Each structure stands twice: as structure tokens, then as C-alpha cells.
Amino acid sequence: MLPEQDDFLEKLFREHFNELELYAYALLKDQPDAREAVQDAFHIACTKIEAVMESPNPMGWMRLTVKNLARNRRRQRSREMLLLLPLEEAGETPVQGEEGWFEFLEQCRAVLTPEEMELLMSVVVEGAPYSEKASDLGISVWACYKRVKRSLEKLRHGLER
């Protein structure tokens, strides 16, 4: 990146990060996810710095990027929660719900490795942020996201059989 591009992006970051984070929070209703969305938006801005600088409204460009990232995060969370929807229905009657829950967990354990199961339980069920799990595992947030996605796909295919 050229020095003037670096200065431009740094100024944009310093002046508008908090504003963009509040905007992302309004869309996501989750502080860690909001912060990650804004950080991802600035990462995208780094890769497309010419487009940001040439934009007549760089802040509008950033807001649109944050909005798209937030929408993608909400969509991903919805997909993850669809997997767990039958559990909520099973919980209507306590005895069947508990048995259904244990049966479902056993089916999941038969399909997934213990590491995949632990990651899915913490991110999908407990709602742990990707950044937290990535830090625990010593991997990037993107790698953590991809592991969750692959584990969910593996689980869906395994449970369909």
C-alpha cells in the first residue's frame, strides 16, 4: 500500500471505527460480532483501497460494506440455528425433550469428531464469538469460521443419512 493510501485508511479508521461499530451493533445486536464485522470491513477496504479512495463517499462505502457483512453474519447464524430448531420443539415436553436432546447429541457425536463437537457446541449453542474460539484454538477468525461451517455441513449430511 502506498503511504497516502495508508494515511487515508488510518484516518478513516481513527475517525469512524466507533461510529461503524455502533452501526454494526444496531444490525447484529451482538458486540463481539459487531466489532468483527467492522474489522472485516476495514480488511476489505485494505484490499480495495483504490475503490474506497475513489468513492465520492468513503464513509458510505464503509457503511455498505459493514451492512453486507452484518447481513451475511445474520444469515449464517440463522442457518446454524435451523439445525437446532428441532431441539426447541422437543423441549415442549420435559421428558421427551431430555431424551430427544440426549439422542440428538449421540447422533451428533457419531458424525463429528470431539473437537468439531466442542467447537459447534460453544459457537452455535452457547453463542461464543468466533474471535474468542479462534484465540483459544490459536487460529485466525476466518479459519475458525470455516471450521464451524464445515462441521455444520458434515453434521447435516451425517444426520440426513
Image (spheres, rainbow, N blue to C red):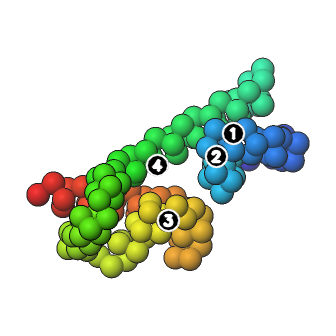
Give, as a three-letter code, the residue at label 2: Lys
Q: Give 74 or 106, whichever is nearer the viewer.
A: 106
Residue annotated with mark 4: 77
The residue sitting at 33% across, 79% down in the picture is 114
The tag earlier along the polypeptide, 4 or 3, is 4
Q: x, y (%) of residue 127?
A: 52, 61
Q: What type is the residue that disc 3 sits on?
A: Glu
Q: From the viewer's perspective, is 157 left or right of 3? A: left
Q: Would residue 98 appear left or right of 44 to someone viewing this image?
A: left
Q: Position of residue 100 (x, y in %)?
A: 24, 65
Element assignment for label 2: loop
Marks 2 and 1: CB-CB under 8 Å? yes
Q: Nearer the viewer, mark 4 or mark 3?
A: 3
User: Which quadrant of the view contains residue 65?
Assistant: top right
Q: Which mark is residue 26?
A: 1
Q: Which residue is mark 3?
A: 126
**Gap in angstroms between the C-alphas marked 2 and 4:** 12 Å
Q: Residue 63's spot in the image, x, y percent?
A: 70, 32
In the depicted view, which residue is nearer to us: 31 or 42? 31
Q: Is residue 132 left or right of residue 59?
A: left
Marks 2 and 1, how far apart at CA: 6 Å
